[in-house]
C-alpha cells in the first residue's frame, strides 16, 4: 500500500501543469515556494521507496539465480549417482547399485524443488521489475518538474526585484520638480557657494597661523625704520646707510630718478 501510494503521488506530481497552477494562484511566488518544498520532500521519500523496491528486486533475483544454480547442481549430482549405480550394477553389486539409484532419486527430487522455487519467483521478479521501471521514470519526471519549478520561482523573484527597482526609480523621478527648471541649477549654485566659503575659511586659517604673524611683524619693523630715516633726513641728521663707504646700497628707486635731483 505504501509503495502504491508513493507511486500514485509520483504519477500525480509528474503530470502537474505548472503554468495552469500558476495562472490560478492568488500569490504565485508563495505557491511556487510551497510546490518546491512539496516536490523536494516527495522526491526524497520517493527515492527512499524506489531504493527499497530495487533492493527487494535484487534480493528476488539473487534467490532466483541461486535456485537455478541449485537445480543444476542437484541435476549433476543425480547424474553422477545414476552412473555410479550403473557401474555397481554392471559389476554385479545390486545392493550398492540400488543405494546410488536412491541417491539419484533424492537429488532429482531436490532439483525439481529448486526449479519450482525459481519458476514461482519469476512472476514476482517481472512485476517488481515493472514497478521499479515506472518508479524510476516517475522519479525522473518529478526531478524535471522540480527543476522547472525552481526556474519559474527564480524568474518570478528576479522579475519582482526588477519591478521593485523600477518603482523606486519612478518614485525618485516623481520627487523632482520638473515645473521649476532652475531648481537643479539653484542646488548646484549653493554647492559652489559652500565650496567657495570653505576655501575662504582655509585662507583665513592659514593667515592666522604663527608664521603669517611673524611675517607681518617683519614687514612692520622695516616700515618703522624707513619712517625713522626719512625723519632724520628732514632734520639734517641723516644716518649713514650700511655700506656707505663707497658701495651703493640697494634701492627699489631707479637710478635715473636720482640724476634728476
Image (cartoon, helix red, strand yellow):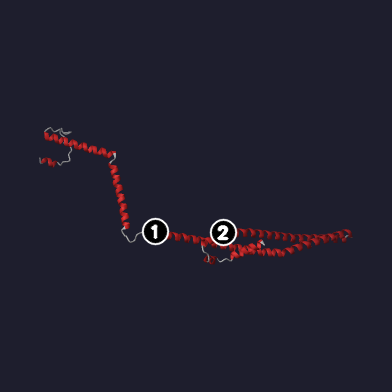
Residue 37 circle label? 2
Vertical order, 48 against 199 (above or below) = below
Res 137 quadrant in image: bottom right
**Badge 2 density bin: few <14, some 14–19, many ≥20, Cα 10 Å:** few
Q: Are marks 1 and 2 in contact (CB under 8 Å)?
A: no
The residue carrying mark 1 is 172
Q: Looking at the image, is mark 1 or mark 2 earlier in the sequence?
A: 2
The image position of residue 212, as x and y in percent, is 27, 40
Give SS at disc 1.
helix
Res 240 quadrant in image: top left
Give SS at disc 2.
helix
Query: Is residue 162 shown left or right of residue 142?
Result: left
Q: Is residue 93 visible?
A: no
Along the viewing direction, whichever of 11 and 85 lies nearer the viewer: 11
The residue located at (29%, 42%) in the rendering is 206
Quarter of the image where the C terminus is located: top left
The residue located at (30%, 47%) in the rendering is 199
The image position of residue 204, as x and y in percent, is 28, 44
Query: Is residue 38 shown left or right of residue 179?
Result: right
Amino acid at each position: 500500500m505504501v509503495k502504491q501510494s508513493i507511486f500514485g503521488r509520483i504519477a500525480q506530481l509528474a503530470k502537474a501543469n505548472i503554468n495552469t497552477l500558476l495562472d490560478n494562484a492568488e500569490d504565485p511566488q508563495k505557491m511556487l515556494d510551497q510546490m518546491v518544498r512539496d516536490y523536494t520532500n516527495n522526491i526524497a521519500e520517493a527515492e527512499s521507496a524506489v531504493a527499497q523496491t530495487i533492493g527487494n528486486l535484487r534480493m528476488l533475483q539473487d534467490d532466483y539465480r541461486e535456485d537455478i544454480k541449485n537445480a543444476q547442481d542437484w541435476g549433476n549430482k543425480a547424474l553422477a549417482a545414476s552412473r555410479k549405480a550403473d557401474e555397481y550394477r554392471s559389476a554385479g553389486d545390486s545392493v550398492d547399485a540400488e543405494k546410488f539409484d536412491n541417491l539419484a532419486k533424492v537429488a532429482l527430487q531436490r532439483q525439481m524443488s529448486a526449479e519450482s522455487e525459481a519458476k514461482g519467483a519469476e512472476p514476482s521478479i517481472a512485476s517488481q521489475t515493472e514497478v521499479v521501471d515506472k518508479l524510476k521514470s516517475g522519479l525522473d519526471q518529478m526531478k524535471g518538474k522540480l527543476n522547472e519549478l525552481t526556474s519559474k520561482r527564480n524568474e518570478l523573484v528576479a522579475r519582482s526585484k526588477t519591478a521593485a527597482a523600477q518603482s523606486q526609480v519612478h518614485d525618485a523621478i516623481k520627487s523632482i520638480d520638473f515645473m521649476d527648471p532652475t531648481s537643479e541649477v539653484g542646488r548646484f549654485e549653493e554647492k559652489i557657494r559652500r565650496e567657495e566659503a570653505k576655501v575662504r575659511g582655509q585662507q583665513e586659517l592659514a593667515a592666522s597661523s604663527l608664521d603669517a604673524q611673524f611675517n607681518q611683524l617683519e614687514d612692520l619693523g622695516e616700515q618703522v625704520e624707513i619712517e625713522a630715516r626719512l625723519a632724520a633726513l628732514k632734520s639734517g641728521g641723516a644716518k649713514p646707510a650700511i655700506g656707505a663707504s663707497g658701495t651703493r646700497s640697494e634701492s627699489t628707486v631707479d637710478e635715473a630718478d636720482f640724476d634728476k635731483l
